Image (tube, rainbow, N blue to C red):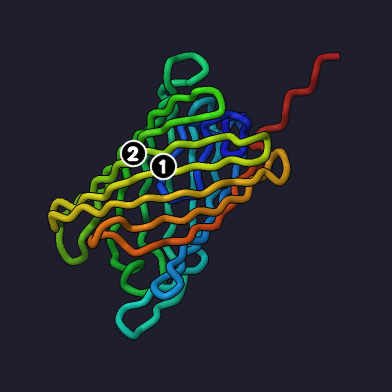
Amino acid sequence: MEGTVSSSEFVNTPYISRTVGVGTAGHGEIEMEGVLETDPSEFAKSKVKLNLGVVPGVEMAVAWQPFVSTRSGETRNRGTGDVVLGTKVKIADAADSVVGAIVEMEARLPSGSAGSSSVRGETDTLLATSIGQSMGSFSLIGTYELALLGEAGTDSMNTEHGAIVAASWRVNEKIRAFVEASAAYSPQDSVTAWYGGFGGGYQVMPQLELQTALQVGLDDDAEDFMLVFGFSGVIGSLFQKEVAER
């Protein structure tokens, strides 16, 4: 299996970075992910996501935010968040080459009801690529992200750049730990925010992993901190397996 709970070294972290794996869902597999991100005094955002392995090396995804709570001044906005559609393509397999690599695209459709952060009426697009290499029980993954953000009321589009380096350690068959460093650059504001993070996952059964993490801002332009709780697992197959020949 090439998905999120595989024994492979390339597995997703608890979502501190958007894109941290270099694998895709296995052909015909349906994976489910869930995450809660929160700074308790500022926001709480949940997300559930289905990943579909439509053909070998190609994954399609749909995600939804069933609950979002954000604060603007003294006002607290609560409601649902946006729908996100995505696709991920494996361009290099770590089993056959020196590194594993994927490219990914996501589109956020403005369909939420949780205040101005989710009802801007504009579509955002994320383009990303990740490259990873394993060294026994250790993995190192680098990711570059380009976000194209629609601006309400105008035809213009803002851009944001992200860079992430994540190191993962498979402690044993059930426990995984990771650390990461990331930077987010906003050209229109000439602002770069730096973050550090760490976390881990516990595989409660072969097809299900529970995850937790902490992200901390490292400069004045970064958010102070964010707690992350998540899970990922394989829940079924798109296709019936072929009946073995008698």
Amino acid on which disc 1 is placed: Thr
Vertical position of residue 107 compared to residue 30: above or below? below
Vertical position of residue 241 compared to residue 219: above or below? above
Q: Which of marks 1 and 2 is nearer the N terminus?
A: 1
How would you rate the neighbour count of disc 1 (Cα within 10 Å): few for under 14, some for 14-19, many for 20 or more?
A: many
Q: Residue at x 25, y 58 (%)?
A: 219
Where's residue 66, x and y in %?
A: 52, 65
How would you rate the neighbour count of disc 2 (Cα within 10 Å): few for under 14, some for 14-19, many for 20 or more?
A: many
Quarter of the image for residue 103 reads top left
Q: Mark 1 points at which residue?
A: 19
Which residue is at the far bottom? 74
Query: Do callouts 1 and 2 mark residues in contact (Cβ within 8 Å)?
Result: yes
Cα distance between the residues tagged 1 and 2: 7 Å
Vertical position of residue 139 compared to residue 214: above or below? above
Where's residue 9, x and y in %?
A: 55, 30
For the question of whether residue 34 can be seen, the reply is: no
Q: Mark 2 points at which residue?
A: 128
Q: Is mark 1 on a helix, strand or loop?
A: loop
Quarter of the image for residue 8 reads top right
Amino acid on which disc 2 is placed: Ala
